[in-house]
Image (cartoon, coloured by chain):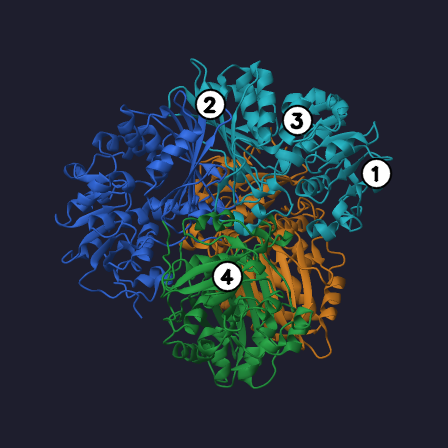
Chain colours: A green, B blue, C orange, D cyan
């Protein structure tokens, strides 16, 4: 029995890179999306296989077989999700039909300044002409532009969590934008399904360590967006850690308050800013965000704490890196681009315990 | 924003014991059920609290506050889910209004023979008059009786997995019902949220051990149902193991084949038996069930393997103990009892990775 | 076969509170210590039991049965380890024979200022007269005083890690002691074997969250020791997180450099300070500490990183909270107190994978 | 400071394949072995690197750098441990000096019948002339032959656990050797450090599944040894499962008792058989083996349980797959081969919690 029945009211979806973890998360969410039908899926290494040969748990959903990118026919497809590795997407998107809407989950179009891109990613931008068309897909901040855009560059998982907690208070001038310390912790799915020694169970279980200290590629994304609101170029401390869990990301951020501002003021700013946002929750004083409270869902939970050091405060945000941190936010953006209610297909409750 | 809007077409639900893990799983599923509205929740130890004080991840769902059992008013409630500890439910159900439908997740009404109950649970049955009304809630086998019943006794998690794999082949006379060895492995949520040393993280992580060897209370349930189809009283080996994972249950069963029967024959019997069942999947030869392929979903996945020992076969079944193994199956039964499409509210895909 | 043979050259050891996790870790290490013999073990809740009824994995070691505290006879005992809950040790130590050496693993004698103790622990100090005798057992910093003392107050696990990384660079005036942000991550054994909902497997696995934000009791310990070297009272940010792992603690600390000081300078200070320390390793530039690199061992591993924010640096330290963070350091101190080579009984390599 | 000082009384050790998990476990144990000095280590993929570039946690041990196999000079080396992948060892051992003792941890010399080897491993045996010299290294059963041998083929991890529990009772004629069902559960390190999708954290965590059902290569090893004692060729059911843990292996075996034999009889046979064995413990009735009770140690723990099915019993054995299941048993064998006390270097207590 097929979970989906295709009809004329449904968007026809193509997924480039459907065999990775962000790809399969798109599939998990889209097969239950009432306005979407997956019509095309690519995965070069698995071309020719039925999807449940790669991900048996999604069997029974009447999905198209996997094909190579070059075999894809885009006729009749409304939107392409690109869940490809960083550095490979620019060239592929460049060749897609000009009227095909694109939601990109890679980093390839996130940095507005192509020189910054080249500096952090080690090669020239392969589609500079397209970069100007790209909208940074932080839904709660670029809603109108996303709705009108052809190409959305979804934020990285860490920037999503960090920016949602920081942008409103930077915009309000409540913190010193030049003294932001972001200590982040992520589950292993953030590294994808690629075969890396550092992703092996025995290398990760029962332990924690930082990685990419002071040179993780999500830093310039965060700086780009904070800099816009701060009104000047900023440099942040961003220190991610790898955790023995599948999903989930916790961002603990240490900020210096502007004169006279308190942690309560920050909390109040966030409560007001997100009052009408379905997916963003600010927990009351005394309550603490935890990644398990958002597992499998598109929710973002943030808490604010006074620091013992006078003049400082602590922000803690939890997301599921595969949902709000990538595939869920991508679908949220797709909904906007096609004038579908923004929460459609994303209303699952968190899975706990 | 409330996730549910109560209206006259919706069932009014009461949950007794809403603060345990099967309770919160009922809530997770019911807040997204289009025909259900949670109207009443009890949890004696947490009475007076809002639900999100106990389970913050389900905040924002406009749920009633927790109350004590004796404070519950059943006027206008259509169905009560009992997610109470074993041994406490009989007395409580006995006092409920006679026209209130009851879906019980405890073991209190599962054993048809009250002497067997007394033997395994250490006390006389407190509601023997009601036992005759109870229907064993293994949905795929008692669908008609469940639909017509007032009191459904949902199977234990292990019996659900074991019986779904065994009953069709016992009924077909394809295996020796007196030589069934069930080696089961469960995640820790099967032990509930009670404070037990054996459920502490450090006692469970990075290890495995069997428990209740040869005297686990799920054995008589399995024997009751197999015995009915075998036509005589049977004794099974049932050996559960505690695993370092939250959810999921794998049942590996070793059976002796009847003369001339092959493992392929078993698989074929299961394929035919479950051809029209939405939640039950029989994987093809060469494919292997895994608990992570059903995580968070109501699906049951079963594989059949030839043994190297001539005349024997191996059955492997995976379920999520909190969904098909308890709260999901309970809702499936509720749907039947109220003539709602059986899969309503239970169509979530598995959460992997 | 007994693992230990008691003889006249061996210290006779008493352990108060042998049934907790720091207690069992003392036993694990001491049964292999060539100069120690466990002669007495208390555990009020398990009095009368053989030790392997509580911890089967240590069977075969010819250990004394567990007794109640009040049943203990201290004749002939050389040293008592107190592995009791915080707040209970002061009264017990007060009643011990005056010539019995005591290594305390609790927090009861760590804070030199009894007013600070009362403020953080919620009650007056019960043995103020003894506080003056207590030496803070951070081995690498108080070696001489520990060797001469009767009562050693072993540091908390977090302070051990944080102070070993910070004290040399504070002493050198290389960082601003008033702008120290300590983001810490710990395994669950740090919470002990007590039955707490927050220590249940299903509440911890597959997730992370901070706890005790801005009011964790290890903060005043850290401040006490840093303040001494800074020459003035300091306040630090200390934010611990609970991780899904048994053992291990990672402390990521963000510091502001004094004028002209670089991250390399900090590393050089630490390398020089710890050049002769067997258990303290400073990793070279480009290498990253991980908790799994110290699992089960008394080692401390620290790395130093330049921050992208000019004038800041990052320190990362990993320890095993049950070894160097408690029981291992306690034994290291005992060795000093009895003029035994300091590394005796503590030379196990880390257990990885 | 070097952990080892090489002197003339110490064995000079060579390790072929030192970069895998059994290799590093050899190193962990041997650096603390009082009679051993590691003189040579190969790892073709890492040749030229210092060992702590591959395994930082073993830094500070004054180990030789990694070299290629062909660069190894065997002059002065007393014994070679081969921790190489299956199928590669026969050719390498064939070329080693004839007077070099060899302890092989691979499967290459375990099967006495080279036709059986070819059937299960898919190629002809590359060193058939050497096979006759090889002794199966199940220490507790082949002690004398191991002591006298030049080439020891250490058993697989699963066979070690299964045979230690089964051989005495098969020898005693207490069970039916043709009705043995072995349900095994292993941690992920059993799969080694090779890059395989199935070993990725996100593919293993929070789940369990069987693998190699009815065709795992450890079956013929088990059958070879049981067959010898049974006096005829036997076929066993052997069904391994992959568990979300690093180390540890639990083998739950279901046996049919000979007429008149009880589970107590089995336990008594095992108690007597292993009364003088330092590493083998038979737990009393009512106690249950757990893998965490042997973690990091060379111990084997076995329990025996009566089955509810008349005439059947259950055996449960726990080992650490990397210690008694491979590298620990290998060192135990080396001790025998060089007339060193058998437990030397292997007396670590289990690491729990």
Of marks 2 and 3, which one's residue comes earlier in the chain? Answer: 3
**What residue sits right under mark 3 in the picture?**
D117
Cα separation, mark 2 vs mark 4, equals: 51 Å
Report, in whole angstroms, how far the alpha carbon at label 2 lies from the one at label 3.
27 Å
Q: Where in the figure is residue D241, as x and y percent of width and height?
A: 51, 38
Task: Please tell me whether residue B318 is drawn above or below residue D333 in the rendered image.
Answer: below
**Residue C246, visible in the rendered structure:** no
Q: Secondary structure at mark 3?
A: helix
Tag 2–tag 3 contact (CB < 8 Å):
no
Disc 1: host chain? D
Residue A233 in the image: x percent, y percent? 61, 82
Marks 3 and 1, the one that precedes in the sequence:
1
Q: Chain of mark 4?
A: A
Question: Circle 2 sits on which residue?
Answer: D255
User: What residue do we see at 29% from left, 41% from top?
Assistant: B140
- Mark pair 3, 1: CA separation: 41 Å
Residue under disc 2 on the same chain as residue under disc 3? yes
- Image point (66%, 64%), residue name: C165
Q: Which residue is mark 4?
A: A15
Residue located beneath label 1 in the image? D7
Q: Earlier in the sequence, mark 2 or mark 1?
A: 1
Residue C309 percent across, percent down from the top left = 64, 76
Crowd band around label 3 with a 10 angstrom C-alpha radius: few (<14), some (14–19), many (20+) = many
| Distance in Å between CA atoms under marks 1 and 4 | 64 Å
In this rendering, the answer to whether A244 lies above or below A169 is: above
Same chain check for tags 2 and 4 = no
Marks 3 and 4, Cα distance to the nearest angstrom? 46 Å
Same chain for labels 2 and 1? Say yes or no.
Answer: yes
Give whichever of A215, C61 is nearer the camera: A215
């Amino acid at each position: 029995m097929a979970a989906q029945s295709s009809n004329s009211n449904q968007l026809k979806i193509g997924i480039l890179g459907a065999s990775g973890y962000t790809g399969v998360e798109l599939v998990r969410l889209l097969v239950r999306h009432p306005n979407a039908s997956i019509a095309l899926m690519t995965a070069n290494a698995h071309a020719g296989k039925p999807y449940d040969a790669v991900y048996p748990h999604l069997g029974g959903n009447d999905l198209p077989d996997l094909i190579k990118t070059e075999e894809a026919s885009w006729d009749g497809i409304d939107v392409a999700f690109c869940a490809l590795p960083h550095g490979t997407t620019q060239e592929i998107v460049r060749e897609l039909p000009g009227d095909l809407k694109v939601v990109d989950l890679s980093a390839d179009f996130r940095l507005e300044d192509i020189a910054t891109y080249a500096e952090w990613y080690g090669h020239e931008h392969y589609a500079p002409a397209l970069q100007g068309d790209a909208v940074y897909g932080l839904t709660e901040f670029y809603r109108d532009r996303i709705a009108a855009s052809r190409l959305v560059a979804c934020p990285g998982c860490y920037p999503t969590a960090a920016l949602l907690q920081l942008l409103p208070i930077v915009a309000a001038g409540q913190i010193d934008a030049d003294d932001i310390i972001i200590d982040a912790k992520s589950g292993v799915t953030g590294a994808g399904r690629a075969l890396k020694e550092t992703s092996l169970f025995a290398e990760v279980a029962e332990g924690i360590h930082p990685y990419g200290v002071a040179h993780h590629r999500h830093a310039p994304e965060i700086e780009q967006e904070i800099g816009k609101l701060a009104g000047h170029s900023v440099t942040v401390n961003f220190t991610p850690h790898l955790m023995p869990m599948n999903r989930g990301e916790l961002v603990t951020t240490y900020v210096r308050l502007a004169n006279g501002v308190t942690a309560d003021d920050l909390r109040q700013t966030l409560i007001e800013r997100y009052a009408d946002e379905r997916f963003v929750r600010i927990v009351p004083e005394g309550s603490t965000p935890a990644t398990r409270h958002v597992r499998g869902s598109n929710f973002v939970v943030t808490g604010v704490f006074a620091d013992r050091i006078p003049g400082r405060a602590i922000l803690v945000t939890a997301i599921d890196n595969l949902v709000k941190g990538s595939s869920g936010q991508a679908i949220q953006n797709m909904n906007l681009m096609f004038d579908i209610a923004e929460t459609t297909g994303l209303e699952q409750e968190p899975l706990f315990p």
